[in-house]
Amino acid sequence: MSPLTPARTRQSRRYLMCRPEHFTVSYSINPWMEPAKPTDTALAVRQWQSLYEAYIALGHEIELIDPQPGLPDMVYTANGGFVIDGVAYVPRFRYAERQGEEQHFSRWFRENGFRVVEPEHTNEGEGDFLLAGDVILAGRGFRSADDSHREIARVFDREVVSLTLVDPRFYHLDTALSVLDPVVAPGETPTIAYLPGAFDDASRAELERRFPDAIRVADADGAVFGLNSASDGENVFISPRATGFEAQLRERGYTPQLVDLSELLLGGGGIKCCTLELRGGER
């Protein structure tokens, strides 16, 4: 790290997580899921616990939603909503296999002091919506409907930037892009990292225009879900297999925190998938 590298500041975060007590891969709704391949639920729980403990050790607040039998993907809480200022825009899942989760997330938000907005259009929460400073980056192409981008712009009265995903391995925005500065001053641009090959030409051009100092991550690091990461502004929680991305983060003054969720990757999810940011609401 050079003397010119900016100092990074940790921002205390509040996250919603779900213990993967019922995790298994019994169906396939993304290219990572192979039901014929054995899964180890106990290992998934141990790996998830290591992420939970890493957050706690660095001073972050964790809320838990109860896992439900028959809903093995509830561990991927990022898909359970998108929350700003205590308002929770809840999901409407594309695939029937996950639609049973919707009522549980809605109920949790209501019972915990959030104002719930029920969607009219298909969306998969923070999987496809990422807050980047003053704007919402929104993924399209595989899961969340284009109409949900217009809907979320109305709900939160913010500019929404639609980005088209083209590689089915990266079916949610949070698998191909990470916001590294969760809190910035109004009008400031946060640092992001993204996988260029996951987006179409127009989306890449838009990202280059808006985020000229972004970290562009290599395909090898994207393919191990290196970008499916969470950041508190200083510490970035990433896969230990994303070694190139780890080096890039250190060069920018961030502190990588390596957490292996390889078992949960069998379901097509990683660190960010298991982490829903809660902004506002009662405590």
Image: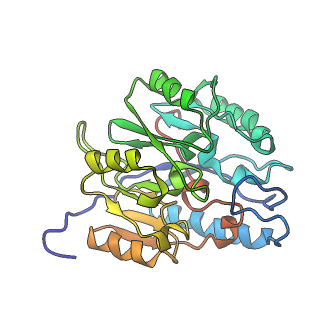
| Residue 229, placed above or below residue 50 | above
Residue 192 image position (x, y, % from top left): 35, 54
Q: How many marks?
A: 0
Question: Is 224 situated left or right of 216 in this image?
Answer: right
| Residue 152, placed above or below residue 180 | above
Residue 195 shows up from this direction: no
- Please name the colour scheme applied to the rendered image: rainbow
Residue 40 image position (x, y, % from top left): 79, 72
Q: Nearer the viewer, residue 175 or 86?
A: 175
Q: Nearer the viewer, residue 256 or 166?
A: 166
Q: Nearer the viewer, residue 251 or 86?
A: 251
Q: Nearer the viewer, residue 23 or 172?
A: 172
- The quadrant in which the N terminus is found is bottom left
Which residue is at 60% across, 70% downward? 50
Which residue is at 71% across, 61% downward? 267
Residue 216 image position (x, y, % from top left): 35, 63
Which residue is at 52% across, 77% downward? 241
Question: Is 192 situated left or right of 143 in this image?
Answer: left
| Residue 275, placed above or below residue 215 | above
Which residue is at 33% across, 44% downward? 206
Q: Residue furthest front?
A: 201
Residue 123 shows up from this direction: yes
Residue 166 image position (x, y, % from top left): 53, 51
Question: Is 2 situated left or right of 237 in this image?
Answer: left
